[in-house]
Amino acid sequence: MNNNDVLRSLRFSLELSDDEIARLVGLGGKSLRAEDVQPRLTREGEPGMVPCSSAVLGAFLDGLIRDRRGPPDPSRRPPAPVPLNNNEILKKVRIALELREEQMLKIAEVGGQKLSRSELAALFRKPNHRHFRPCGNQLLRRFMRGLVKTRRPTA
């Protein structure tokens, strides 16, 4: 699943405007003007499509976390930067929306992905853990579809 699809799914499910997306990217530490958001929401192959970089998507997700949960505790050391992959995207969405295990399983099921508790836990482990499981594109796509269906049931 490419970054544009993730951004588009989150925008639709959370009902965010271009201005709100630009503001959240700003909260995450990157600069993006509201008029630069729409080309990143365009589907692949359509005219005017601009690829959404991992830096912009990561800043958007970090800004979403900061907006929904508040700024991080200044006494805590900031975590080391981690490359953005499907597991990190899923983890950041979980943190931003404050989703519990049961909610994550329900969202995945609504999207067409049946997961057990242990399979879900494996997605959030460190990559060097023996039970780590990489989050595939199909799993992330189905989770995002389930998120849209649970957040906007009439869509």
Image: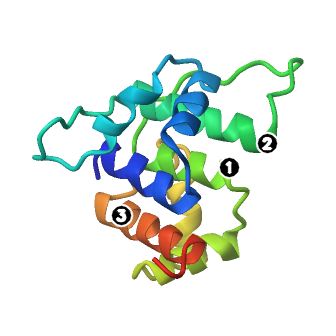
Q: Are marks 2 and 3 in contact (CB under 8 Å)?
A: no
Q: Type of residue at label 2?
A: Arg
Residue 36, image quadrant: top left
Mark 2 lies on a secondary structure that is helix
Dot 1 amino acid type: Ile
Badge 2 or badge 3: first in the primary sequence: 2
Quarter holding the C terminus is bottom left
Q: Earlier in the sequence, mark 1 or mark 3?
A: 1
Residue 27: x, y in percent?
Answer: 64, 25
Residue 46's x, y, as percent?
A: 13, 46
Residue wearing tag 2: 69
Residue under circle 1?
95
Asked whether disc 2 touches disc 1, contact meaning CB atoms under 8 Å apart, the reply is yes
Is residue 29 or residue 143 the one in the foreground?
Answer: 29
Under circle 3, the secondary element is helix
Q: Is residue 112 left or right of 66 when viewed as pictured?
A: left
Q: Is there any visible trace of residue 130 in the rendered image?
A: no
Distance, label 1 to label 3, CA atoms, is 18 Å
Q: Say which of marks 2 and 1 sits in front.
A: 2
| Crowd rating for badge 1 (residues with CA inside 10 Å; few <14, some 14–19, many 20+) | some
Q: What residue is shown at x 44% (from left), y 64% (from top)?
A: 144
Which amino acid, by three-letter code, is at mark 3?
Answer: Arg
Q: Measured from the top left, where is residue 40 in percent x and y?
A: 31, 37
Task: Characterize the local packing of mark 3: few (<14), some (14-19) or many (20 or more) Cα atoms within 10 angstroms.
Answer: many
Please give the name of the residue rendered at 26% of the width and 45% of the height, measured from the top-left corner: 42
- Residue 2 can be seen, yes or no: yes
Marked residue nearer the N-terminal end (2 or 1): 2
Q: Secondary structure at mark 1?
A: helix
Give x and y (percent) for residue 38.
35, 38
Disc ID at residue 141: 3
